[in-house]
Image (spheres, helix red, strand yellow):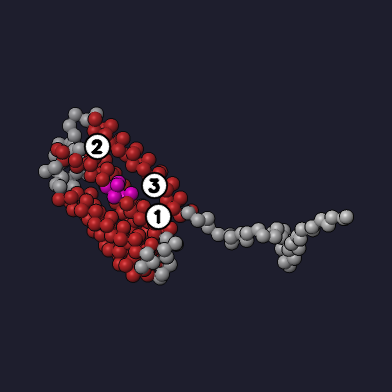
């Protein structure tokens, strides 16, 4: 008795005019449309923060190397109070809370609260930038007076640059939140911005420790 052999059906070749793409086998998944790979923004921010951390580490190594080789540290005549660094620290702590509020609101698809939190973060950031600019411009020494003056200006300027960049980034996030660009599953730019802002707070912790806490004679 003859045994019939089943014949497998095959999909016909693609016949789309103007293209030469091969047809997919029957049952194959349809490929996702070309575009930016998921996670590119966050990955890029991770790489940026890694490089940024190395720059910060280099500055701190230079600071403590020079400090260790100086018989008097900081230089005589340096007078810095604790009011401004304390105010900056408290303001940055408040901005960390507002940034966390912004990120939680975005993940909950609450664009209104996300916008309000972003605006509050920008206001706090502007206050920090103003205080740091005042600290640099109104010190009773300059970057060319001695090693401490140079490192003081460089470290504060390094953090000030982060604050300014963060303000710009958060402003963009605020505008996008107001326009409803974010959702519970689409908030990579906001997440990357939050990471950058939190890292700037870590930078301040290192700067205030080096310039003020571990340089006690700098206080008036």
Rounded to the nearest angstrom, the CA distance separating label 2 from label 1 is 35 Å
Q: Residue at x 31, y 54 (%)?
A: 163
Residue toward you, 153 or 37: 37
Tell me if mark 3 has few (under 14), some (14-19) or many (20+) residues whose alpha carbon lies within 10 angstroms of its own: some
Dominant SS of magenta comes to helix
The range drawn in magenta is: 199-204
Q: Residue at x 19, y 38 (%)?
A: 215
Q: Which residue is mark 3?
A: 49
Q: Which residue is mark 1?
A: 192
Residue toward you, 201 or 5: 5
Q: Residue at x 52, y 55 (%)?
A: 37
Give the image location of residue 150, x and y in percent.
26, 41
Secondary structure beneath dot 3 equals helix
Q: Earlier in the sequence, mark 3 or mark 2?
A: 3
Quadrant in the picture for the C terminus: top left
Q: Is residue 214 visible?
A: yes
Secondary structure beneath dot 1 equals helix
Give the image location of residue 43, x and y in percent.
46, 50
Rounded to the nearest angstrom, the CA distance separating label 3 from label 1 is 10 Å
Give the image location of residue 75, x and y in percent.
18, 36
Q: Which residue is mark 2?
A: 147
In the rendered structure, does residue 203 fall within the stretch colored magenta? yes
In the displayed structure, would residue 187 be above or below residue 196?
Answer: below
Tell me if mark 1 has few (under 14), some (14-19) or many (20+) residues whose alpha carbon lies within 10 angstroms of its own: some
Q: Residue at x 26, y 40 (%)?
A: 151
In the displayed structure, would residue 201 be above or below residue 106?
Answer: above
In the displayed structure, would residue 8 be above or below residue 141?
Answer: below
């Amino acid at each position: 008795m003859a045994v019939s052999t089943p014949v497998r059906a095959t999909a016909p070749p693609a016949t789309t005019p103007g293209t030469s793409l091969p047809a997919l086998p029957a049952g194959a998944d349809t490929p996702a449309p070309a575009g930016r790979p998921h996670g590119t923004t966050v990955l890029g921010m991770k790489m940026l923060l890694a490089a940024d951390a190395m720059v910060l580490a280099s500055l701190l190594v230079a600071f403590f190397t020079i400090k260790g080789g100086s018989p008097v540290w900081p230089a005589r005549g340096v007078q810095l109070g604790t009011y401004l660094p304390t105010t900056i620290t408290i303001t940055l702590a408040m901005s960390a809370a507002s940034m966390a509020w912004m990120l939680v609101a975005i993940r909950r698809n609450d664009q209104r609260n996300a916008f309000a939190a972003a605006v509050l973060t920008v206001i706090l950031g502007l206050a920090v930038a103003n205080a740091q600019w005042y600290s640099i411009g109104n010190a009773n020494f300059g970057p060319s007076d001695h090693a401490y003056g140079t490192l003081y200006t460089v470290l504060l300027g390094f953090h000030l640059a982060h604050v300014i960049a963060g303000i710009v980034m958060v402003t963009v996030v605020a505008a996008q939140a107001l326009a409803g660009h974010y959702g519970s599953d689409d908030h990579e730019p906001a997440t990357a911005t939050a990471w950058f802002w939190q890292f700037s707070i870590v930078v301040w912790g290192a700067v205030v420790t080096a310039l003020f806490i571990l340089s006690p004679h700098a206080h008036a």
